[in-house]
Image (cartoon, rainbow, N blue to C red):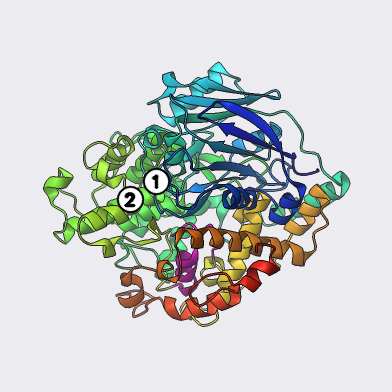
C-alpha cells in the first residue's frame, strides 16, 4: 500500500497484549482513512449500548493517507469513540506535530480496548511498542506530563496525553497533543482516562511512501503557490488574526452567540476580537506540520491577575468564554484557555457550561449558595476559577464537569442548555444562519461545526454568498459541506485546506484538490464520484451507529430558544431557525426515511447493507 502505512496497532489494556494488524486495503479504499477508518471499526466491533466509560468501549486514533505526506495542512488525526458527554459517536480532530509522528511510526491508527489496572502510557519507537508505568505521571498537567515523557523517552518524541480532567472523567475532557493542540470535543479524554491510559508517545522516522512521487510533487508545488499568492487574503484572514478574526464577521451579521444564546450581538465585542488579540497578546504565529497558513497563536499575558503564556485562544473559545458569558476581558479569556489546555478541557463546552450556570443563577433556578459565590454575567474572575475547579472536579466544578445539559437538567431547566444531542454549540447563531442550525442538529457528534460547516456559504461567501436568513434549499448545502468535511477528515487534512483562496477563483463544494492528492499518494485511482461516494459512506455509516443507539429524528433537535423565540435585536432580529422544515428536505437528499433512518436502498448502494 502507498499513502497508507498498511498497519493498525491493537492495544488490549486489560491484558497488556499489543499486536499489529494488516489494514484491509478494500476498507482503506472504501473509507479512505481517519474518520472513515474510525467508523469502520466502531461499527464492526463496538456494541452501541455500551457505557462510554466501560472497558468495552473502543478508542480509535486514526491518521489519513495524506497525513505526514507534506500536502498542505496534511497534519490531522481523528479520535473516535462513544462519547460520555452525548452517548453518541464522536470524532474529535487535532493537528500539530503528533499526527505526522504517529503516521511515521508505521501505523495508520491505534485501536485501544479494555482498562489497565493502574496508570500506563503507550510508547511507540523504532519499530517497537511497549506499555510503561505511569503512576508517577497521574495528576500532572498535560504540559508537565509532556515534558516528563519526552525526558524519559526521546526529546524528539511527540506526546498526546490527558490532564487531571481526563483522569477525573470530566465528561468533556480533551486529549491534548504537542501541549496545546486538542482533540477537544465530546469527552475523548475521559474515555482515555477511564482506561487508565495517561499518554501515547510516538517517535517515528519512517517515510510515507507515495504511489507517484513526481505527480505528487508537481501538484503540491501548484497548490502551495496558490496559498502563497493568497497569503494574507484568505477568506477568514487566518494568517493575520487566526480564527479569532471571525468575531468581526459574526458580530456584524448578528450571529455572535451572546448571554447564553439570548442574543446575537455583544456590546463588548471590540475588546475580544482578533485584532485586539494580535495587537496586545500575540507573540508569533504557529503552524501545524506542512501548513502554509499558520493560524495558531502563541500568546502571552502579562496582566498579573491572569498572567501566563501558551497557545490560543481560537474563535470558538472567545465566543464561548467571552460573548456567551458577557465577558469582555480578553486577558481572562486567554488565561481560562491556558487552563483548559493544561488541565485537558474542551474550551467550547467549558465556556458554554459557565454561561448556562450564569443564566440559571440569573433566573433564580440555581442558588448562589450552590455556586459558592455570586455569579453575575461578565464575571471574568469566576470564569477562570470555575475552569480550574472543573478540571479537578472541585467544589461547583464537580457539577460543571457534567456539561451544561446535565447541569441544567439537574436544576430543573434543561431548556437552558444550548446543545444538540447534549453537546454545546460552536459560535454561529442559527437564527441568523439557517443552515448552521440544520448542521448542528444532524451532526453525528452533536453540536459541531467541524462535521459540516455551511457557515462558509452563509457568512463568509466561500465559494459564493447565499442568504443566511433563507431556509429553503439549505438541506443540499448542508449535505454538501458534510460530505466535504468527511473527505477532509478521512484524508488527514485540515478544513482550511478547502477554504483557501485560489488566486481569485471560487471553490466548488466538492473536494477540490483532495482527489488529485489522494490518487498521487495512494495510486487508488479514485474518480470524483467514487470519492464523493466514500464521503457519503462515512456519513451514512455514522448514522447507522447512531440508529443502533436509538437516535432518530426526535434527537435531531435544537433548543426551543432557537426555533421558537425570535432573535431580539441585530441584523437577524425577528428570525427563528426553521429546523423542522429543513429536516424533511435533508432526510430526502440523504436517502433516509422521514424519521432519519437510512433506507435499505441507500445502505445497499453504499455497500453498508
Residue 260: horizontal and vertical position, in percent? 30, 61
Examine the rendering and report whether any part of residue 128 can be seen.
yes
Examine the rendering and report whether any part of residue 222 can be seen.
no
Assess whether residue 490 is covered by the magenta stretch.
Answer: no
Task: Give the residue number, with chain letter if any, for mark 1.
Answer: 172
State the extent of the magenta-drawn residues as a range. Answer: 433-453
Residue 556: horizontal and vertical position, in percent? 44, 68
Answer above or below: position of 571 versus 145. Answer: below
Identified at 50% across, 59% down, the residue is: 548
Assess whether residue 450 is covered by the magenta stretch.
Answer: yes
Label 1 or label 2, whichever comes before in sequence order? 1
Are dots 1 and 2 in contact, CB under 8 Å?
A: yes
Quadrant in the picture for the N terminus: top right
> What secondary structure is found at the residue carrying circle 2?
loop
Looking at the picture, tell me which residue is in the foreground, 241 or 60.
60
Q: Residues within 10 Å of mark 2 (few under 14, many from 20)?
A: many
Identified at 54% across, 18% down, the residue is: 151
The quadrant holding residue 290 is: top right
Residue 234, label in figure: none
Quadrant in the picture for the C terminus: bottom right
Residue 598: horizontal and vertical position, in percent? 57, 69
Task: Give the residue number, with chain letter if any, for mark 2.
Answer: 403
> What secondary structure is found at the residue carrying circle 1?
loop
Amino acid at each position: 500500500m502507498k499513502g497508507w502505512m498498511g498497519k493498525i496497532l491493537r492495544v488490549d489494556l486489560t491484558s497488556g497484549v499489543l499486536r499489529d494488524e494488516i489494514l484491509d486495503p478494500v476498507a482503506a479504499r472504501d473509507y479512505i482513512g481517519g474518520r472513515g477508518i474510525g467508523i469502520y471499526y466502531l461499527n464492526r466491533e463496538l456494541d452501541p449500548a455500551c457505557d462510554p466509560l466501560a472497558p468495552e468501549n473502543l478508542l480509535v486514533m486514526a491518521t489519513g493517507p495524506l497525513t505526514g505526506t507534506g500536502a498542505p495542512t496534511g497534519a490531522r488525526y481523528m479520535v473516535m469513540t462513544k462519547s460520555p458527554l452525548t452517548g453518541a459517536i464522536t470524532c474529535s480532530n487535532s493537528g500539530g506535530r503528533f499526527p505526522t509522528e504517529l503516521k511515521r511510526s508505521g501505523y495508520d491508527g491505534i485501536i485501544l480496548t479494555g482498562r489497565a489496572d493502574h496508570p500506563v502510557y503507550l510508547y511507540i519507537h523504532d519499530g517497537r511498542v511497549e506499555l510503561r508505568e505511569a503512576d508517577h505521571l497521574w495528576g500532572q498537567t498535560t504540559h508537565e506530563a509532556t515534558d516528563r515523557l519526552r525526558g524519559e523517552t526521546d526529546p524528539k518524541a511527540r506526546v498526546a496525553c490527558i490532564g487531571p480532567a481526563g483522569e477525573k472523567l470530566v465528561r468533556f475532557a480533551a486529549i491534548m497533543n504537542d501541549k496545546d493542540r486538542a482533540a477537544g470535543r465530546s469527552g475523548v479524554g475521559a474515555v482515555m482516562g477511564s482506561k487508565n491510559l495517561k499518554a501515547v508517545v510516538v517517535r517515528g522516522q519512517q517515510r510515507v511512501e507515495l504511489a507517484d512521487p513526481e505527480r505528487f510533487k508537481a501538484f503540491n508545488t501548484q497548490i502551495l503557490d496558490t496559498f502563497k499568492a493568497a497569503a494574507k487574503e484568505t477568506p477568514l484572514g487566518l494568517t493575520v488574526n487566526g480564527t479569532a478574526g471571525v468575531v468581526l464577521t459574526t458580530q456584524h451579521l448578528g450571529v455572535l452567540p451572546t448571554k447564553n444564546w439570548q442574543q446575537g450581538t455583544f456590546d463588548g465585542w471590540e475588546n475580544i476580537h482578533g485584532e485586539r488579540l494580535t495587537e496586545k497578546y500575540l507573540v508569533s504565529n504557529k503552524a501545524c506540520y506542512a501548513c502554509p497558513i499558520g493560524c495558531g497563536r502563541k500568546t502571552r499575558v502579562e496582566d498579573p491577575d491572569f498572567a501566563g503564556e501558551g497557545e490560543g485562544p481560537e474563535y470558538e473559545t472567545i465566543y464561548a468564554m467571552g460573548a456567551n458569558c458577557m465577558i469582555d476581558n480578553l486577558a481572562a479569556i486567554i488565561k481560562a484557555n491556558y487552563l483548559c489546555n493544561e488541565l485537558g478541557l474542551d474550551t467550547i463546552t467549558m465556556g458554554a457550561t459557565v454561561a448556562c450556570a450564569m443564566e440559571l443563577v440569573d433566573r433564580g433556578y440555581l442558588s448562589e449558595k450552590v455556586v459558592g459565590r455570586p455569579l453575575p454575567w461578565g464575571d471574568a474572575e469566576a470564569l477562570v476559577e470555575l475552569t480550574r475547579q472543573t478540571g479537578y472536579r472541585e467544589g461547583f466544578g464537580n457539577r460543571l464537569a457534567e456539561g451544561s445539559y446535565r447541569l441544567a437538567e439537574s436544576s430543573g431547566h434543561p431548556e437552558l442548555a444550548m446543545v444538540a444531542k447534549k453537546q454545546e454549540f460552536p459560535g454561529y447563531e442559527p437564527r441568523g444562519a439557517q443552515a448552521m442550525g440544520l448542521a448542528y442538529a444532524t451532526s453525528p457528534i452533536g453540536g459541531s461545526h467541524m462535521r459540516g460547516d455551511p457557515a462558509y456559504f452563509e457568512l463568509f461567501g466561500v465559494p459564493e454568498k447565499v442568504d443566511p436568513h433563507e431556509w429553503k434549499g439549505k438541506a443540499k448545502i448542508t449535505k454538501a459541506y458534510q460530505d466535504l468535511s468527511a473527505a477532509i477528515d478521512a484524508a488527514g487534512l485540515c478544513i482550511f485546506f478547502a477554504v483557501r483562496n485560489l488566486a481569485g477563483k471560487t471553490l466548488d463544494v466538492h473536494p477540490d484538490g483532495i482527489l488529485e492528492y489522494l490518487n498521487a499518494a495512494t495510486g487508488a485511482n479514485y474518480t470524483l464520484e467514487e470519492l464523493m461516494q466514500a464521503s457519503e459512506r462515512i456519513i451514512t455509516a455514522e448514522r447507522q451507529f447512531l440508529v443502533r443507539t436509538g437516535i432518530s429524528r426526535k434527537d435531531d433537535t435544537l433548543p426551543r430558544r432557537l426555533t421558537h423565540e425570535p432573535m431580539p435585536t441585530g441584523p437577524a432580529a425577528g428570525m427563528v431557525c426553521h429546523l423542522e422544515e429543513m429536516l424533511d428536505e435533508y432526510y430526502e437528499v440523504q436517502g433516509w426515511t422521514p424519521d432519519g433512518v437510512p433506507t435499505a436502498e441507500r445502505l445497499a448502494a453504499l455497500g453498508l447493507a
